[in-house]
Image (cartoon, rainbow, N blue to C red):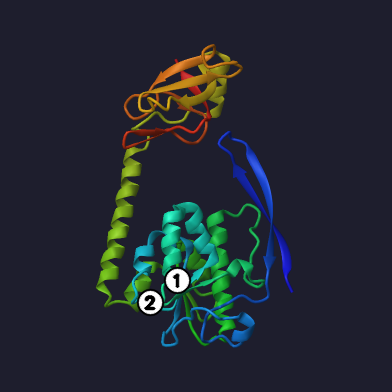
Amino acid sequence: MLQKREKVLLLRTFQGRTLRIVREHYLRPSVPCNSPLCPQPAVCRNDGKLLSSDVTHYMIPDWKVVQDYLEILEFPELKGIIFMQTACQAVQHQRGRRQYNKLRNLLKDARHDCVLFANEFQQSCYLLRERGESMEKWQSRSIYNAATWYYHHCQDRMPIVMVTEDEEAIQQYGSETEGVFVISFKNYLDNFWPDLKATHELCESILQSRRERENESQESHGKEYPEHLPLEVLEAGIKSARYIQGTLNVNKHRAQIEAFVRLQGASSKDSGSVKVEIVRSYVPCQISLPTLAVWDRGLVFFPPQLFVYNF
């Protein structure tokens, strides 16, 4: 019997407004597990692609592993991979359609021993997000809960290895359930695929690239543009007329060098606008929202937003 739930989504528009969207979410007592060890294949309706029967374990990647190491997961030598619906949706929302389509093609390819498990539609696997819980923590908790259910569903006959980059998840879930192991992706490759040199080299390259990006981010913090002013300073500056408040609009014909500030309360651009010159890869203004203008390869991206400009 289906169980009905309601999922509440809070979406922010380009105008800064927050929309509350409620969607119906139906849970089923059984969804395809796509495992040859399934005790009730007719109930699960395992009509499609099945996992290989000659593997020593099933591997379930966390959402972060799917995002960062998808190129490694595409190696046909890696077998018995179960992609959770939660991880796939995280890739779609955070990495875009291009990488999501790569993941879909991987699941469809008969040469790769991997399947999709719709954990968010299974009654025993679906978890509500707790109040104050971050999206990342909920995703990891949902994937681990689904991994535990999958292990018991296969009658404890196949060990499950959940790989994650979250150290807290490793500490919390590592020894919680017998037969379900939680380790880092690098440790997984070192222990289960030590002779697969290509995956180790690619993993090291990805880790090195991540470390370089983190170092560049730390070095450039506060140096490429002025830091945000505290909210109370902005409010005081507006009251004292040191700052003006308005909406930033970039000239689409001269996006690299020109933008206009629409002052609050002005009826037209001509009667209430301030011209802004774009210099040295940033606009000389103080953004009141927690995002800065992005300068990338000669293009400037300025979503219309409220900001404060300093004369």
Q: Position of residue 157 (x, y in %)?
A: 52, 87
Residue type, numbered disc 1:
Lys
Task: Tell me if I can see residue 165 in this picture.
Answer: no
Q: In x, y percent, where is residue 37?
A: 53, 87
Compared to residue 196, the image places residue 257 above or below, namely above
Secondary structure under tag 1 reads helix
- Residue 86: percent from left, percent from top: 54, 63
Query: On the rendered structure, is 149 left or right of 165?
Result: right
Q: CA distance from mark 2 to mark 1?
A: 9 Å
- In the figure, is residue 295 to the left or right of 201? right
Q: Dot 1 surroundings within 10 Å: few (below 14), some, or many (20 or more)?
A: some
Residue occupied by mark 1: 108
- Give the quarter of the image for residue 39: bottom right
- Using the image, tell me which numbered label, if any, was put on residue 92: none
* 201 to the left or right of 38: left
Q: Quadrant of the N terminus?
A: bottom right
Residue found 49% across the figure and 56% down from its top? 92
Residue ID at (48%, 25%): 249
Residue 253: image location, x then y, percent? 39, 26
89 or 205, nearer to the observer? 89
Q: Circle 2: is it few (<14), some (14-19), or many (20+) Cα within 10 Å?
A: few
At a point 42% along the width and 19% down the height, the residue shown is 276
Q: Is residue 25 visible?
A: yes
Label 2 element class:
loop
Quadrant hosting residue 33? bottom right
The quadrant where residue 7 appears: bottom right
The amino acid type found where label 2 is placed reads Arg
Q: Which image quadrant: the C terminus?
A: top left
The residue under the point 57% across, 69% down is 118
Q: Give the residue number, with chain letter if any, for mark 2.
A: 111
